[in-house]
Image: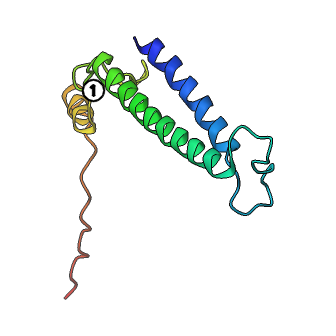
Amino acid sequence: MQTVLIVIHLLVVIALIATVLLQRSEGGALGMGGGGAGSFFSGRGQANALTRATAILATMFFITSLALTVLATYTRSQKSIFESPAAVTAPADQPKGTVLDKLKQMQKFAPEQAPPGPETPQAPPRSQ
């Protein structure tokens, strides 16, 4: 269903581009000529037909765009970042856990090697 809708959407896009490029420029400098005596449409009839065709194709473009969006939303599987495993894993040489966990592990395995506290300076003896 989605493939069919994409093909229809692309055909509408190509037709919309063609109808916009066929329209006569308002400035007249880029216009490829108007409706002469031998043309199928008169100048006014051609403008009305192309304007109507552009409006219809633009409406079809919006409808197919919305339909593709709705179809893509319903066919997509819902994923939560909390339920899936983490995509980024820690390297094997680094232990897992927070900094506090690492400090607790270090204290648990080496309590006798705790660093000495700050030394307080001794006051010099008083002489009398």
Taking the spot 69% from the left edge, 43% from the top edge, the residue there is 21
Q: In which quarter of the image is the C terminus?
A: bottom left
Residue picked out by circle 1: 81
- Quadrant housing residue 76: top left
Left or right of 108 in this view: 64: right
**Residue found at the very far front of the displayed protein:** 37
Taking the spot 36% from the left edge, 26% from the top edge, the residue there is 67
Q: Which of 36 and 69 is in front in this view?
A: 36
Q: Which of 74 and 5 is in front in this view?
A: 5
Q: Where is residue 61 in the image (x, y as percent from the top left)?
A: 47, 34
Left or right of 50 in this view: 99: left
Q: Position of residue 102 (x, y in %)?
A: 27, 32
Taking the spot 24% from the left edge, 69% from the top edge, the residue there is 122
Q: Nearer the viewer, residue 121 or 57?
A: 57
**Number of numbered markers:** 1
- Quadrant housing residue 40: top right
Q: What element carries label 1?
A: loop
Q: Where is residue 26 in the image (x, y as percent from the top left)?
A: 68, 61
Q: Where is residue 100 in the image (x, y as percent from the top left)?
A: 22, 38
Q: In which quarter of the image is the N terminus?
A: top left
Amino acid marked by disc 1 = Ile
